[in-house]
């Protein structure tokens, strides 16, 4: 069983350790305080391999900000490029496959010679041809190419900025056929097995040549509603860009009404030069609206990293997107309040002491020479008990008066005791002379009542008849009584079986051993053993009541 101190120490150490582990876990994984951490962010850095290679450098420049969006464009000068027959798609596909949470955004033109300033009349003819399915094969090849590269979930920004005037794939010359043409392209690409494409409908902010809602082809063929928004008119402030017709607010409301996610595939500086307020407000708007993704166009005059002519906007952009990890400030140590348990003091296993029945042991005076006393056989126990020369001390007698028991003749042991040197300290009262304190006149007609002796004899002395200290001769002499107990014989002349007790009075400090008293001639003594039961006999020892009848000449009973 552990000691209480060790148990208390173990409890305290465990409590403090748990608190330190919890604190360490909190310090080891600080939560990024970046408001844009959950929005996929990217930048257009280049259409080919250089664009892929620059992504980790942009991430480092932003303090480890994760760049999750890779953005590029297919060339729109020939149908071969629109079909995806270009080598740089391999580089982008490889980058995309490295992480499952990345997005590959690919702008796909809807017409060849897409930036050749084709007039509206010719654009209308091209739109009708597409609506009739004349260009379906080109888009099927593109879908098969993307699936084969392992990027079947590419985000396709199809026919972007269709509400403007720049591209041949614009919508204004024939909006209805343009919408039909869009549907044919989407359905053709979706027919390729294994594809998971998402189609992003992305107009310019503002009215431009036509309100972009008039070009919306339908919810069944659109997955995302995006918007390209540069810092240019219409509108002089960012608030104007939000509230103007077909502006930022209408874009968000339209997408929400159609149950679509939003995006900002292109945004950046333009007509208003280095405008940090625009960059700050645009980032705040993005954070508020939670688009699926956003990518800044990072080349001059739009960019903030590769373009060095917009330092103020660059500073705002970098500070806003760099993960704001806590400064290396030593946090206040979280010291848990030690729970001091109540010391568990084990109850000492003290065995219940076996207290024997109190036995009054009188002080034992050790004589110089202790010789064994003659063995006196007990009337009940057959084994002889050697009486110890112990000076009895007065004790409170038991109030129980035992009933007299008729004596039964007990034959004494025929053993002849060995000569015993008398002990000078053991007083032996005369068995014939009664105690002076209790004089008893033996009367054969009226016996005295039995008064228990106040002296508790030693439990080892079986009989009140003390052996004479006189060294007995081996030969039986009428003057020296034998230490063997006298065989009691019932007397027909004694009317009462209750004899008068003989109370010996020991001399507490005998200077010299008393001289033996010669018993009267022809005196006879009868002893009756008293049975107090097993328990009381152990306490007071073996007791006997003796009756002495003097047949001397002076008594008048001398028969001889």
Image: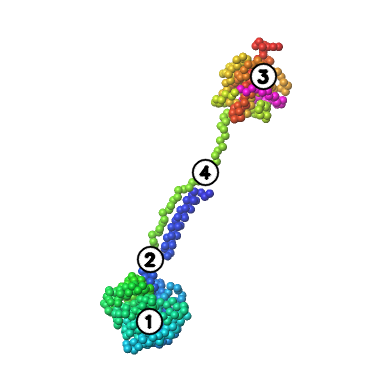
* Image vertical order of residue 548 relative to residue 262, above or below: above
Who is closer to the viewer here, 422 or 65?
Answer: 65
Q: Is residue 498 left or right of residue 136?
A: right
> Mark 1 or 4 closer to N-term?
1
Asked whether the residues under the numbered discs 4 and 3 touch, taking CB atoms below 8 Å apart as contact, a structural biologist would say no
Magenta stretch in the rendered image: 404-426
Residue depth check, mark 1 versus mark 2: number of the one nearer the observer: 1
> Mark 1 or 2 closer to N-term?
1
x and y percent of residue 103 in the render? 41, 75
x and y percent of residue 72 in the render? 40, 80
- Residue corresponding to mark 2: 326
* Image vertical order of residue 249 relative to residue 182, above or below: above
- Residue corresponding to mark 1: 182
**Helix, strand or loop at mark 2:** loop
Who is closer to the viewer here, 428 or 15?
Answer: 15
> Mark 3 or 2 closer to N-term?
2
Residue depth check, mark 1 versus mark 4: number of the one nearer the observer: 1
**Cα separation between marks 4 and 2:** 56 Å
Taking the image as drawn, is residue 309 in sight? Answer: no
* Image vertical order of residue 8 relative to residue 508, above or below: below
Residue depth check, mark 3 versus mark 1: number of the one nearer the observer: 1
**Cα separation between marks 3 and 2:** 117 Å
Q: Identify the residue at horizontal 40%, vertical 85% (top origin).
A: 133
x and y percent of residue 241 in the render? 29, 76
Mostly what secondary structure, the magenta segment? loop
């Amino acid at each position: 069983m552990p000691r209480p101190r060790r148990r208390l120490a173990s409890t305290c150490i465990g409590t403090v350790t748990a608190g330190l582990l919890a604190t360490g876990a909190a310090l080891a994984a600080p939560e990024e305080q970046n408001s844009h951490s959950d929005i996929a962010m990217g930048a257009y850095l280049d259409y080919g391999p250089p664009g892929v290679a620059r992504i980790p450098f942009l991430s480092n420049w932003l303090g480890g900000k994760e760049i999750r969006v890779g953005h590029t464009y297919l060339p729109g000068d020939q149908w071969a490029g629109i079909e995806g027959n270009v080598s740089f798609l391999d580089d982008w596909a490889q980058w995309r496959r490295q992480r499952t949470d990345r997005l590959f955004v690919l702008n796909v033109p809807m017409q060849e010679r897409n930036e050749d300033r084709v007039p509206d009349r010719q654009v209308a003819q091209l739109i009708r041809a597409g609506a009739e399915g004349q260009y379906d094969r080109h888009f099927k090849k593109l879908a098969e190419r993307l699936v084969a590269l392992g990027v079947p979930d590419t985000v396709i920004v199809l026919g972007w900025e269709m509400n403007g005037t720049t591209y041949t794939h614009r919508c204004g010359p024939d909006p209805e056929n343009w919408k039909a043409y869009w549907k044919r392209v989407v359905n053709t690409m979706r027919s390729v097995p294994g594809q998971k494409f998402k189609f992003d409908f992305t107009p310019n902010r503002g009215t431009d040549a036509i309100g972009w809602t008039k070009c919306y082809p339908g919810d069944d063929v659109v997955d995302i509603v995006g918007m390209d928004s540069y810092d240019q008119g219409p509108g002089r402030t960012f608030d104007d860009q939000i509230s103007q017709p077909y502006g930022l607010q209408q874009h968000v409301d339209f997408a929400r009404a159609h149950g679509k996610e939003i995006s900002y595939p292109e945004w950046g500086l333009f007509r208003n030069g280095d405008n940090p307020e625009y960059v700050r407000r645009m980032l705040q708007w993005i954070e508020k609206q939670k688009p699926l993704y956003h990518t800044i166009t990072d080349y001059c005059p739009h960019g903030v990293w590769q373009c060095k002519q917009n330092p103020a906007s660059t500073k705002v952009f970098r500070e806003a997107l760099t993960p704001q990890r806590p400064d290396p400030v030593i946090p206040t140590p979280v010291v848990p309040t030690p729970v001091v348990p109540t010391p568990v003091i084990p109850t000492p296993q003290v065995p219940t002491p076996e207290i024997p029945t109190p036995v009054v042991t009188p002080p034992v005076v050790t004589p110089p020479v202790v010789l064994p006393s003659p063995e006196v056989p007990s009337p009940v126990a057959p084994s002889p008990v050697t009486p110890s020369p112990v000076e009895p001390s007065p004790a409170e007698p038991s109030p129980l008066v035992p009933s007299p028991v008729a004596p039964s003749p007990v034959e004494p042991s025929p053993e002849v005791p060995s000569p015993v040197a008398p002990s000078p300290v053991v007083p032996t009262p005369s068995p014939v002379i009664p105690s002076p304190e209790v004089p008893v006149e033996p009367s054969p007609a009226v016996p005295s009542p039995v008064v228990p002796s106040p002296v508790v004899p030693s439990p080892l002395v079986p009989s009140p008849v003390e052996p004479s200290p006189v060294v007995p001769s081996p030969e039986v002499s009428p003057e020296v009584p034998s230490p063997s107990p006298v065989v009691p014989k019932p007397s027909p002349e004694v009317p009462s079986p209750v004899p008068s007790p003989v109370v010996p009075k020991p001399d507490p400090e005998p200077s010299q051993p008393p001289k033996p008293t010669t018993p009267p001639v022809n005196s006879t003594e009868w002893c009756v053993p008293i049975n107090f039961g097993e328990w009381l006999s152990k306490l007071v020892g073996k007791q006997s009541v003796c009756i002495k009848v003097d047949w001397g000449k002076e008594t008048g009973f001398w028969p001889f």
